[in-house]
Image (cartoon, coloured by chain):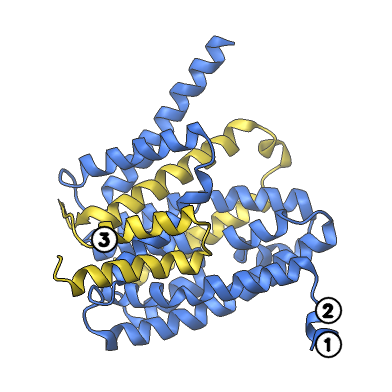
Amino acid sequence: MSILAWVLVGAATAFAIKLAGYLLPQSLLDRPPVTELAAAMTVGLLASLTVMNTVANGQSLAFDSRLLALGAAAIALKLKAPYLVVVLAGGLASALGRLCGLP
Amino acid sequence: MPKTLAGKLTPATRMGLSIAIAVGVYGISFGALSVTAGLTVWETCLLSALMFTGGSQFAFIGVIGGGGTGAAAWAAATLLSVRNGIYGMQLKALIRPPSRLIPVMAQLTIDESTATATAQDDRDERVRGFWTAGLGVWLTWNAFTLVGALAGDALGDPKQWGLDGAAVAAFLGLLWPRLTAKDPIATAIVAALVTIITVPLVPPGIPVLIAAAVTAAVWAIRRRRTAVAK
């Protein structure tokens, strides 16, 4: 399938999941495992995506200016900076790294 | 000014509007990164308008940009949007919306609209918070996605502008507020290690799915253990 087709299938799936939440019986929400597992999965996925975006370069590991971005973002978050500032700090850190000749 | 617009704003609508502006601007980086990953401007805008769940959209283009297949991109995006289903259940319980509004509410059910709604204390404020944040983010997110996608082509090498670093920060910013206790921190460390180990071993996009599977397995084992201990 083309990328466009996967975009549309992905969008349809995302909507179906959102809608399912409103249509499922309330009793399901009251079961702790469902919410607990969803919370754990979200943390696991976001952690994996963070790491993947930091060190993955296709199918190999690369340690470059993106690590500076990770550090800068962590400091910004530690200082309770707003989300946009965090994103900008990350972008600025890796841009500066490249400006200084780092990979 | 205070007596006209600002005077009519409630804490919930004020929160929703500021979130819409803050999050929407960051649609620029999504748009730019998406065209850099190889998607067209048109596909990029469709993702923001229809999929409309930032984490999943980033996962989708992240997998494509890393050379993964459309199927792997779909799987990563879908797994990351499961929490929206939980949000839907929470919002239904909190707001009890009329059924004719449910399809539109479902589309607008994301981290930001849920957070704004659940942060309020009474039902009317929750409703106002949900709609302000939901509609507000949808509008700004899509507008800035288009700006970013058009600019992305013009920018040249996005790495020079630190856009890949911005994506790293964006994901860490989504993860950070969830690391509030020992359990989620342990989960995040395990998922991070699994990702680092599997990146060189399997095709792009698959490490995220393996990390998700390991997260679920660790959760199941822990749960069984605490059940036995009781």
On what subunit does the disc labeled 1 rest? B
Chain ID, mark 2: B
Q: Chain of mark 3?
A: A
- Label ID, residue A66: 3
For residue B166, which quarter of the picture? Answer: bottom left
Q: Secondary structure at mark 2?
A: helix
Q: Which residue is mark 2?
A: B8
Quarter of image, res B122: bottom right
The hue used for chain A is yellow
- Display colour for chain B: blue
Is residue B157 shown above or below B23? below
Three-letter amino acid code at the position of disc 2: Lys
Viewer-proximal residue among B152 and B189: B189
Is B67 situated left or right of B137 in this image? left
Q: Name which residue lies at 72% across and 55% down.
A: B119
Residue A63 appears at what percent x and percent y? 18, 54
Asked if marks 2 and 1 touch (Cβ < 8 Å), the reply is: yes
Q: Is residue B111 visible?
A: yes
Are tags 3 and 1 found on a single chain? no
Mark 3–mark 2 distance (CA, rounded to whole Å): 43 Å
Q: Which residue is mark 1?
A: B4
Q: Which residue sits at x=59%, y=11%?
A: B230
Q: Is residue B62 left or right of residue A58?
A: right
In the rendered image, which quarter contains the N terminus of chain B? bottom right
